[in-house]
Amino acid sequence: MARIMIQSILVVCTGNICRSPIGERLLQQKLPTFTIASAGICGLAGRPADAHAQKIAAMYGVSLADHVARPLTAAMMREYDLILAMESAQINRISLIAPEVRGKALLFGQWLREQDIPDPYGKSMEAFEYVFRLLGEASQEWANRLTVKGLCTCRRKA
């Protein structure tokens, strides 16, 4: 039997300026030995993180100051062991861009009651704080499962 080793995670949202940069940084805090990056389906290439996202992240000790948005590509997705999208519709889009990666694309909020993480873009600071908390809960759940419960050590037939 072969072991499935997850060592790299790509976090995906719409523009790569709100949810995915926060998710990336939170996962990196919880999984420091993993390679973690983010990108956007409708990538707003070169843009910094949204000002509200930067502000709410900073309130919790997370810096997005050096974040630069990147567009999602098929080649990029092939490089990562796990792809975490914010919404079900984004998984469908990922499948259209690179059908071969569909099996490793899951929801960032997979382990939460409401699995889709809503987009706070253009909304209030309260909306950003709510999303930040969801991303915090979800990233902790992923960290627990990837390091303790065994996604890194699950087995499949060779």
Image (tube, helix red, strand yellow):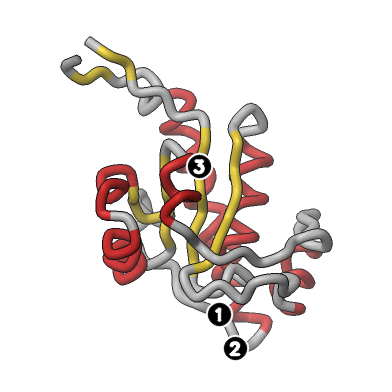
> From this viewpoint, which residue is outermost toward the left?
157
Q: How many neighbours does mark 3 have within 10 angstroms: few (below 14), some (14-19), or many (20 or more)?
A: many
Amino acid at pointer 2: Lys
State whether residue 40 appears in this view.
yes
Q: Which residue is mark 2?
A: 123
Q: How many neighbours does mark 2 have within 10 angstroms: few (below 14), some (14-19), or many (20 or more)?
A: few
Which residue is pictured at 51% across the width and 29% down the height?
7
Amino acid at pointer 3: Ile
Which residue is pictured at 36% across the width and 18% down the height?
153
Quadrant housing residue 98: bottom left
Q: Which residue is mark 1?
A: 120
Instruction: Provide residue 137's location: percent of width, then percent of height.
Output: 51, 52
Q: Which residue is mark 3?
A: 9
Residue 83 lies, with reference to residue 130, above or below; the image says: above
> From this viewpoint, which residue is outermost toward the front?
75
Quarter of the figure with the C terminus: top left
Q: How many neighbours does mark 1 have within 10 angstroms: few (below 14), some (14-19), or many (20 or more)?
A: some
Residue 101 lies, with reference to residue 120, above or below; the image says: above
Give the Cα distance between marks 3 and 1.
22 Å
Q: Earlier in the sequence, mark 3 or mark 1?
A: 3
Q: Nearer the viewer, residue 51 or 15?
A: 15
Q: Viewed as shown, does residue 21 lie left or right of 111?
A: right
